[in-house]
Every structure is written in C-alpha cells, then in structure tokens.
Image (cartoon, rainbow, N blue to C red):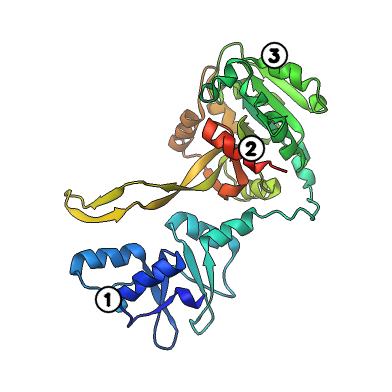
Amino acid sequence: MKELLIRFEDSIELALKKFTDTSSNTLIVVNNNDSYLGTISNGDVRKEILKTKKLTRKIKYVFNKNSTYYYINNYHEEEISKSFLDNNFDIIPILNNKKKVIKVIKLLDFLKKKAKTNKDKIKKIDKSLKEINVVIMAGGLGTRMAPFTEILPKPLIPIQGKPVINRIIENFNEYGLKNLWLTINFKGQLLKSYLNETKYKKNIKYFEEKKRLGTVGALKFIKKKLSKFFILTNCDTIIKTDYSKVVTFHKKNNFDITIISTLKDFDIPYGVCKIDAKNNFINLEEKPNIKMLVNSGMYIMKKDIIDFIPSCKFDMNDLLLKLKTSKKKIGVYSVSSDSWIDVGNWEEYHKAINSFKD
C-alpha cells in the first residue's frame, strides 16, 4: 500500500517513477503526517508537464482535492462498485477516523474478488428463483459465426465438446432457474430436435417465429405464459453470477427492466488528442486504456413491459428507447468481465473455449 502514497511536497518527477513502478494510474497524496489529502492521476501529471515543462513542479499544485474516499467503518461493497463504474477510478483509499490511509482497494482486485467462486462451497439456491421464467432468444441468423451457422444454428456451436445452449441451460439450472422458453426461427427445428433428446426437454417450452421478430418481438406472443418478471437473454451469452442477488437488486429498486452489464477494457493503439470546445489542443494521451460499461445481452424484465412491444419485428434497443421516453425505470446491474462469457463472434468464441478448459 505504501508504494501508492506520495507526499504533497514531492515532485511530479517522483510521481512518474511511482506510476511506472506500481503500474497504477493513480497515487494517493498525503501530508507530512501521512494524513490523506487527495489523489493524483497519470493524466494530471502529464497535463502539468505539457503546461509547465517542469518535472520539479510539486504535487501540491497539481493533485485532485475532491477525489473519492471512504471511512473504514462506513462503506459498503455496493458503494465501492458504483464508484469504480461511475468514475473510472482504478484505486479507492479507505481511511480511519484520523484520515490516515489504512487500506487501498484496487479495481482489478475488487473485480477479481467479485468474480471469484468458491468451488468447494455449495451454492444456495434461492427458492423464489424456481418460479422465474428464463427466455432465451435463439432465432437469430448468427451471421458473425459463419460458416458454422450455415450448417447449424448458433446455440449448437460446441464449447469444449458441449453445445453453447447446454452451457447456458446448465448455468441457469445451478441456481434453480429451470423454467425455460426458447424463441426459435432460423434452423429452429434442428435446435428443437437436439434439445428433445436431452434431459432438459421437460423444462423447455418453445415459441416458433413464423417470420423473424427481432430480439424482443416474440415476447408479445408468450406474455400470458410468463412469470411476473423474467430473465431475457441472448443465446450466445453466459453469465456466471449469483442470480438471487441480481433478482434482489431488480426487485428492491423496483426497476421495470434491469440491464446486466460488465466493465470492459479497451486499448486504444494510437495517441489520442484531447481538445476543448473550440478545437484547441489540450494534450496528447499516448495509447490510453479506457473502461466502458457494456451491455451483456441479458436482462430482467417486468412482464407488464411487454405491453410496449408491438406485434411485429422489434429490437431491444427500440424497447429501451421507448421505455426511457415513457419514463420507465431502467436499472443497470454490473458484473465483472470475468463473469461474462460471450460467444457472439469468433474472437470471443476462442476466449470462451479457454474459459471452459477443465
């Protein structure tokens, strides 16, 4: 932890060295008594160098005095998670009542902790989940997975010898989510024939789209048969998380729909120009790494929301826009990137194969 601390009288040259030594983009600024004052980022330092051309400039003239911190006896995991996601932090300091830094929560460590599953621990199945329907949208063409999907539907793509649809169903079953609906269209009979030969067949109902209805259009035709709220997911999405927590989050906040999202890192392989409102150059950030909250393709929805879907082809993006315009409550529940396995394209498919190596 001490390696992330820097005194306010130190130079920005020392800060640059610490950024390199610690691989952190943020340092915690303290006074001579080691009391917390704020933070300084790699970006703050580089801006100052571009502005003054002086490496001897002291930290006290550059650091952020309004950065986020928490006291040891007054913070919750949900608050930490929200702070990381909303503010693009990579560390958050935890203080005692004398404002001394006693702990530093790192983004990477925090996400690993959230994603970690104890294989020796028996999962406790929330009985209320047994009544919830899961709707798997399996009617798409799967064009990004050609040429495989020219022969078989995307849900039958194998991952370590087992079709992705099996992986999806098994994942839900682990949490007691066994009441499944599949909406099918493209090569739907092949998928149905396969599943009818598996142990899952008694828990699966089908809606066959006579014509393609988009990502949510089929919901209009099965509304009466669905639970009060239900999980909707793509057929190429596997999320390893505690679904009882997701459902509790959705119900507690009384959201009409909750988007399950994940934080993803993207490396920009170029120098990025920062400009002001008048297109004046501010600084150049070399090959930055950015974090973005992305839609995983899984949702929890109230059944009543289906009333906003017309009886024709309709996609989730259109539904979300319609709900937002109608001032419906849309929530976002975040899971770590390690929890999300995507099989939507060949690059992600190869990553998924590695995820299931026994």
* Whether residue 176 is situated above or below residue 34 in the rendered picture: above
Q: CA distance from mark 1 to mark 3?
A: 68 Å
Left or right side of 277 for 107 = right
Q: Amino acid at mark 1?
A: Tyr
Where does the image place residue 47, in percent across and percent down from the top left? 26, 63
Whichever of labels 2 and 1 marks the residue nearer the N terminus, that label is: 1
Where does the image place residue 217, in percent across and percent down from the top left? 56, 22
Q: Which is more foreground, mark 2 or mark 3?
A: 2
Q: Amino acid at mark 3?
A: Gln
Whichever of labels 1 and 3 marks the residue nearer the N terminus, that label is: 1
Badge 2: how crowded within 10 Å, few (<14), some, or many (20+)? some
Q: Which mark is residue 80?
A: none
Residue that numbered label 1 is attached to = 61
* Whether residue 176 is situated above or below residue 181 in the rendered picture: below
Residue that numbered label 3 is attached to = 189
Q: Amino acid at mark 2?
A: Ile
Badge 1: how crowded within 10 Å, few (<14), some, or many (20+)? few
Q: CA distance from mark 2 to mark 1?
A: 50 Å
Where does the image place residue 92, in percent across and percent down from the top left? 49, 67
Badge 3: how crowded within 10 Å, few (<14), some, or many (20+)? few
